[in-house]
Image (spheres, grey):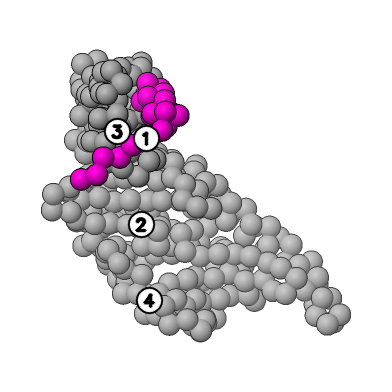
Amino acid sequence: MKKINFSASEISEIINKYKSGISTEKICIYYNVSAVVICRVLKENDIKLSGNKKIINEEEVIKLYNGNTYTISQICTYFSVSKHKIRTILKNNGINSKSSKKYNYYDSIFENIDSEEKSYWLGFLYADGYVRIREKCGSELRLKLAILDENHLLKFKRFISPDNIPVIYEEYKSSKCFKVSINSKKIVNDLINKGCINKKSKIIEFPKFLEPKLISHFIRGYFDGDGSISFSDKQIGLNFVSGSKNFLKEISNKLETEAKCKNANLVGTSENFKYIQFSAKDDLYKIHDYLYRNATIYMERKNEKYNYIINNYNQLKDKINKCRTKI
């Protein structure tokens, strides 16, 4: 294999990068060569390779880890070291690395849906929850919400566990969010048995096992996850969105029988997602009363907007009518 030659300035740059703490694995990516080549350059210039003995700030590692903001993988990336290195530092300082066994969960929380909170969060997870069973890594329930709904995620965290489980910040392109990951086989299996399944968007069915007094809480939870209430110069509308037509039809039926509003038709041109919509004043009032009567848990921002709309419906409708007459 032809030997790769670097210029004096490149060699100096490689040495400076390595001394600053950048690993050979990352330096080789920068120069588009193998790590072996970088190691050769360092050795030829009398630079001792530190390998796994790389010195890093242990106090900073512990601070990042105990702050429940960074995972071990993220800390490894931050310091450019292996997971073994980070786990060794934690162990030597008397800190057990977090695992599914580290945290206590209310493992039987979804075994029986017999309260407002359980019914609400089941509905919310029908909308936004993600469950999976992994042979080697165990079972996982994941809930990911936008930045502005961080407080709601904290409510769920307190509902599911007595411990301070970590809330992880994620950023991908223009999307920013927080998430929690629950590693409990019992919780995941109970959710699946209750109809909250993986890849559920097109096939979920309305949970017929719910007691009548709990249905409004379930629907409110789903509304907070995959529903919307909005107004503009053109319309006022409350929507429930899903890929499952049967699920939406059942919500419409429940709202018709329980809230005494009209039965809504499916709307939308996409075959992947449909929605049911309500816009009449009486329907919005009736649905609000049905969903929020004596409710103790809900997403504040949606409730505030809903309250604003029903309290100012006539003014908003007048504005819409005036805009239509101008067209």
> Where residue 6 is drawn, which disc sits there?
1
In this rendering, would 57 be left or right of 279?
left
* Type of amino acid under label 3: Ile
**Depth-wise, is mark 2 or mark 3 nearer the camera?**
3
Vertical comparison of 250 with 56: above or below: below
Q: Quadrant of residue 222?
A: bottom left
Is residue 309 or residue 266 the one in the foreground? 266
Q: Quadrant of residue 20?
A: top left
User: In the rendered image, which quarter contains the C terminus?
Assistant: bottom right
* Type of amino acid under label 4: Ser
Q: Secondary structure at mark 1?
A: loop
The spot of residue 55 in percent (x, y) is 30, 17
Point out the tag, 2 or 3, that comes first from the N-terminus: 3
Q: Quadrant of residue 8?
A: top left
Q: Which residues are magenta?
A: 1-21
Q: Which residue is depicted at the point 33% across and 19% down?
A: 56
Decide: marks 4, 3 in contact (CB < 8 A)?
no
The spot of residue 127 in percent (x, y) is 40, 62
Decide: marks 4, 1 in contact (CB < 8 A)?
no
Residue for badge 3: 38
* Type of amino acid under label 1: Phe
* Type of amino acid under label 2: Gly
